[in-house]
Image: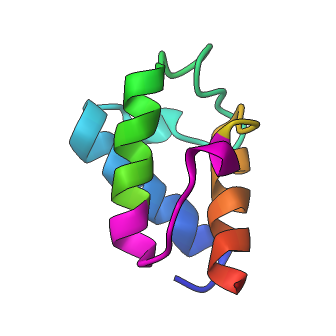
Amino acid sequence: MKNREQILAAIQDIMVEMFEMDPASITPEARLYEDLDFDSIDAVDMIVRLKELTGKMVKPEDFKTARSIGDVVEAVYRLMQD
């Protein structure tokens, strides 16, 4: 994964597969907790999948400030630059 569009697509795939979400609702502007009914367990599951996907050590604190899908994309993007 090189760019934000690819990361967004991967996150959409994970969320559709794991949480049976409508792909159309998974936009950069979508808020994890308010719009997508995400909870802390979902977040942990997502972090595990992102670690598998990126091969990088993903720390929960990297995502503590993430409030939207766009924030998650940005966090993964930054991680991939290391």
Nearer to the camera, 16 or 65: 65
Instruction: Please name the predominant secondary structure of the magenta segment in the image.
Output: helix
Quarter of the image where one finds residue 60: top right
User: Is 34 located above or below residue 63 in the figure?
Assistant: above
The residue under the point 30% across, 42% down is 16
Residue occupying image coordinates x 41% and y 65% = 51
State the quadrant of the C terminus.
bottom right
Q: Nearer the viewer, residue 28 or 62?
A: 62
Query: Vertically, is 48 above or below 23?
Result: below
**Residues rendered magenta in the picture:** 51-63
Where residue 33 appears, as percent x and y from the top left, is: 59, 18
Residue 57 magenta: yes
33 relative to 10 in the view: left or right: right
Measuring from the top left, give residue 76's x and y in whole percent: 62, 64
Give the color scheme: rainbow, by chain, secondary structure or one colour.
Answer: rainbow
Q: In which image quadrant can residue 10 be found? A: bottom left
Residue 21 horizontal/vertical position (percent): 34, 31
Residue at 43% over, 60% down: 50
Q: In the displayed structure, would residue 33 be above or below residue 67?
A: above
Whether residue 67 sits left or right of residue 33 in the image: it is right
Q: Number of callouts in the render? A: 0
Residue at (66, 44) in percent of width and height: 61
Rendered position, 35 above or below 73: above
